[in-house]
């Protein structure tokens, strides 16, 4: 990264609403530096400048990206945004002047100090239908078309393709597995979202499930070689088909890199979910056909047999999602109980037998 003094002056001028002249920049971790060519993440810089006839001194600091939940730039942004909002509320705390960001050119600094909320703007996808409409139709009619099978394979192929891109970053893999258990959108967050007093599940079930997931976290930590490019929330409400096999994906979540089992379970749990609603099980029918088609194609194309020893806690998490009274308030008690049974029995299996998925529901 190259950070020029004139860029610092432009930024500070925007913050102080007046022309700024920088007189000195010194890294706090070493002796004086004539320029900022060596600027790096996590190194604080003392900056002295004049504005309106007054000399001021500030410290510009970034965060190191390695580990401790700071792996993504959004993680670091969250910490720094919070610090800016909180420092000045505590008596005797050093004051925060602003919070900012570097532009993609690596030189320009931009102020975010007066921001209170963020948003994203995306392209509109017209003439497309979410994939769940296909599954809704199959549930209503019981009929499976050739196009349904081709789309299932296309989705499986897509995951094979993106998962083929690997990354060597063991601590990031640890983070993603830790998030699977402890993240607010994952296992612990989902168990917390269930209200008390439900007739079909008690607190002991959640306690036991959480314990098993923690044990799985320690098993999966040994598999950091599996870190791959992922979508992170690959389910039928995040896939839109145009015509035929042409589709687009939406709402990538929780990080660019992760465990392939995340994506595979996010989609295939829905074939189980729909089959339970339509037929009460997975012994036969169109959804079993799609489930097996997806799995067989993925394993044949990827060669990733190891995934069968990894999917268990991911299926447990996704089971908590589809059984949720918050997300699916109209499910029958019987369907919810079978989903919970699936989660518990999958967590007890050392290797997932996708060919006999019905055995996890009985």
Image (tube, rainbow, N blue to C red):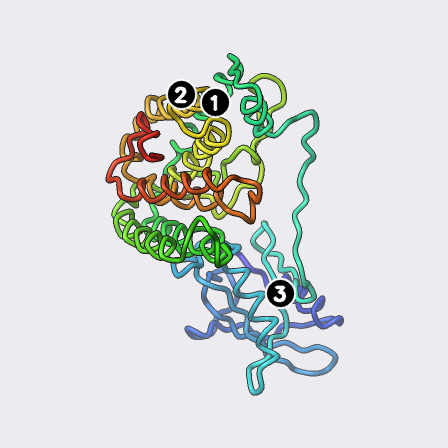
Q: Residues within 10 Å of mark 1 (few under 14, many from 20)?
A: many
Q: Which tag, 1 or 2, sits closer to the chain's start?
A: 1
Q: Is residue 137 above or below residue 184?
A: above
Residue at (42% x, 42% y) in the render: 337
Marked residue nearer the N-terminal end (3 or 1): 3
What is the distance, in whole Å, between disc 1 and disc 2 at their CAs?
17 Å
Q: Between 57 and 290, which is closer to the camera in this rendering?
A: 290
Q: Earlier in the sequence, mark 3 or mark 2?
A: 3
Q: Position of residue 210 (x, y in %)?
A: 35, 54
Closer mark to the observer between disc 1 and disc 2: 2
Q: Gap in Å between the C-alphas at discs 3 and 2?
A: 66 Å
The residue tagged 3 is 8
The percent position of residue 98, horizontal first and vertical second, equals 63, 70
> What's the residue at 45%, 51% (across, down)?
186
**Residue drawn at x 41%, y 29% as measured from the top left:** 281
Count residues near mark 2 (Cα–Cα under 10 Å), then give few for <14, some for 14-19, many for 20+.
Answer: few
Disc 2 target residue: 284
Residue underneath mark 1 = 152
User: Is 222 above or below relative to 308?
Assistant: below
The number of callouts visible is: 3
């Amino acid at each position: 990264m190259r950070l020029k003094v004139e860029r610092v002056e432009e930024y500070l001028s925007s913050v102080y609403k007046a022309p700024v002249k920088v007189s000195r920049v010194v890294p706090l971790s070493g002796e004086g530096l004539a320029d900022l060519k060596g600027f790096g993440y996590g190194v604080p810089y003392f900056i002295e400048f004049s504005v309106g006839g007054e000399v001021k001194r500030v410290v510009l600091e970034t965060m190191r990206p390695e580990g401790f939940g700071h792996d993504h730039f959004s993680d670091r942004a969250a910490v720094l945004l919070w610090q800016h909002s909180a420092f000045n509320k505590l008596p005797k705390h050093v004051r925060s002047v602003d919070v900012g960001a570097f532009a993609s050119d690596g030189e320009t600094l931009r102020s975010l100090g007066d921001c209170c909320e963020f948003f994203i703007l995306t392209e509109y996808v017209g003439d497309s239908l979410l994939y769940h409409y296909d599954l809704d139709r199959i549930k209503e009619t019981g009929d499976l078309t050739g196009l349904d099978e081709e789309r299932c394979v296309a989705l499986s192929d897509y995951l094979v393709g993106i998962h083929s891109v690997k990354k060597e970053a063991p601590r990031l893999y640890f983070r993603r597995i830790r998030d699977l258990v402890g993240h607010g959108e994952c296992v612990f967050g989902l168990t917390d979202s269930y209200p008390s007093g439900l007739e079909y599940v008690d607190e002991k079930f959640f306690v036991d499930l959480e314990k098993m997931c923690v044990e799985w976290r320690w098993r999966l930590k040994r598999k950091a070689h599996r870190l791959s490019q992922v979508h992170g929330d690959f389910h039928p409400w995040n896939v839109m088909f145009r015509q035929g096999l042409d589709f687009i994906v939406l709402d990538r979540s929780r990080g660019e890199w992760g465990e392939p089992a995340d994506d595979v379970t996010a989609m295939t749990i829905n074939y189980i979910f729909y089959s339970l609603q339509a037929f009460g099980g997975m012994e036969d029918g169109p959804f079993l056909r799609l489930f097996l088609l997806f799995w067989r194609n993925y394993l044949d194309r990827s060669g990733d047999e190891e995934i069968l020893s990894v999917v268990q806690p991911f299926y447990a998490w996704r089971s908590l999602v589809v059984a949720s009274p918050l997300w699916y308030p109209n499910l029958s008690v019987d369907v919810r109980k079978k989903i919970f049974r699936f989660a518990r029995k999958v967590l007890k299996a050392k290797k997932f037998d996708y060919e006999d998925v019905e055995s996890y529901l009985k």
